[in-house]
Amino acid sequence: MKSDAVHRVLENELAQARHRRGGVPEVLDVGGGSGVWAVPLAVAGCSVTVVDPSPNALATLQRRAADAGVGERVSAVQGDTDALRSATPSGGADLVLGHGLLEYVDDVTVSLRELVGAAAVGGAVSVLVANRYAAVLGRALTGKVSEALRLFNDPDGRMGGPSGETVRRRFDTELLHRMLDDSGLVVELIQGQGVVSDLVPGSVLEATPGAWDALEGLETAAAAHPPLRDIATRLHALARVSDGHTTQ
């Protein structure tokens, strides 16, 4: 797996899952598409089930898994969050991923409830979402100030109007924390992914000796440190299913 802050958190979580389970961790990747997260997790020794509505994405997933030599560790299920109950491993998944999911679903509350219901007691739910303030800042820095203002003023962090956006909403740290709390999860961490790396031109880094290593160090330091965390391109949260949680 990669070495950014999100991957390190997941690696630690899976190490705990191996200890709890005493065997291979079970991962459920909801909306996992072509396997950007699933295939590396399978390579790391997990059993991964991917639920996604796109048959083309799932076909790509299976090809990538086979090419990586982990085809037997990856299962593909066509569907959305409604299909989770039939796709969930017995006893629940040790780790449920909802990466790039909540921006597009019809109802965040319902989808989160399904993610929580698919996780084992003591297991974790990992969500990765687009950050509304990063979208505002990104457009402002490229001179699209009117668009930045529209994003800032829209309660869902959308362009609105005939913009062609498919995203239904963007999140900020406070909103993400509140929605996870309301779903019954215990939030353990909210951090940023792409805090400064998405703002620094590659040409600048290439021209400066040691800049790539320094940038990686800065990303690691800034990932969980507000206010820098709060302008990251994406917000990542890891939340726990408590012993007292009961699913509907």
Image (spheres, grey):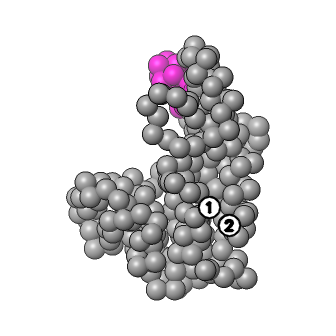
Q: How many marks?
A: 2
Q: Position of residue 63 (x, y in %)?
A: 22, 58
Q: Label 2: state its secondary structure.
A: loop
Q: Is residue 181 above or below residue 102?
A: below
29 lies left or right of 229: left
Disc 2 marks which amino acid? Answer: Ser
What residue do we see at 46% from left, 77% from top? Answer: 85
Per the rendering, the mark at residue 181 is none
Per the rendering, the mark at residue 109 is 1
Quarter of the rendering occupied by the N terminus: bottom left
Given residues 216 and 47, the one toward you in this image is: 47
Pointer 2 residue: 183
On the question of residue 36 being in view, the answer is yes
Q: Position of residue 76 (x, y in %)?
A: 32, 68
Instruction: Please rate how many residues cluster around mark 2, counting C-alpha atoms within 10 Å: few if below 14, some from 14 to 19, many from 20.
Output: some
Which span is picked out in magenta? 198-212
